[in-house]
Image: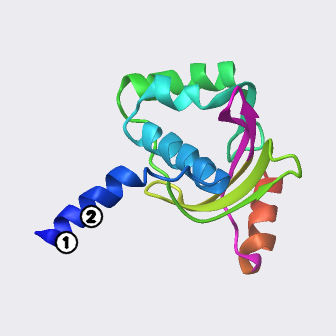
Amino acid sequence: MRTVAICLLALIAFPALPQSPARQVGKVLDDWHQAASVADEPRYFGYFAPDGVFMGTDATERWTVAAFRVWAKPRFDKKKAWSFKPRDRHVDFSADGKTVWFDEMLDTPNLGLCRGSGVLVLLGGNWKIAQYNLSIPIPNAMADAIVKQIAKQ
């Protein structure tokens, strides 16, 4: 009982420490991916900077946030967006701490292993996605064959 009382006293006396900037960025990206997986459109698009850009896996897919939202809306409306499970994330900060660039590997049920990379900016005290680039890593041993297939299109 005494141990419980000491633990409770410690929780009251020492409030939670603020999260490091890297943890804040990780939390934003994790929640952004979670919002897509449950098709929460307002939450998902709320993480973008006003002039943000999303680049998809196809060479033609470079969307402003507004254009990407139009493309994605039917998927969110059907409650079937996409599910990316991030891992192996690397985050780096600018010298002034107001810009972040990152890369992460993504496990996906439909595309297999993917890579996401991007830039976040600190706007009004909140991290916002200025650019996100989704790609499908191609093993070097397969690259020549894939390049030839693409050239035929």
Amino acid marked by disc 2: Cys
Asked if residue 2 shows in the view, the reply is yes
Asked if residue 62 shows in the view, the reply is no
Identify whether 9 is placed above or below 131.
Answer: below
16 vs 98, nearest the viewer? 16
95 vs 36, nearest the viewer? 95
Q: Where does the image place residue 9, in percent across and percent down from the top left?
A: 28, 57
Identify whether 44 is placed above or below 30.
Answer: above
Amino acid marked by disc 1: Thr
For the point 67% across and 18% down, the residue is 66
Q: Where does the image place residue 28, in percent across and percent down from the top left?
A: 56, 43
For the point 56% across and 27% down, the residue is 45
Q: Where does the image place residue 130, in percent across and percent down from the top left?
A: 75, 35
Which residue is disc 1 drawn over?
3
User: Decide: marks 1, 2 in contact (CB < 8 A)?
Assistant: yes
Q: What range of the chain is rendered magenta?
A: 119-140
Q: Is residue 38 left or right of residue 93?
A: left
- Residue 127 belongs to the span the image colors magenta: yes
Q: CA distance from mark 1 to mark 2?
A: 6 Å
Identify the element where label 2 is drawn: helix
State the image quarter where residue 143 is shown.
Answer: bottom right
Identify whether 58 is placed above or below 40.
Answer: below
Identify the element where label 1 is drawn: helix
Which residue is disc 2 drawn over?
7
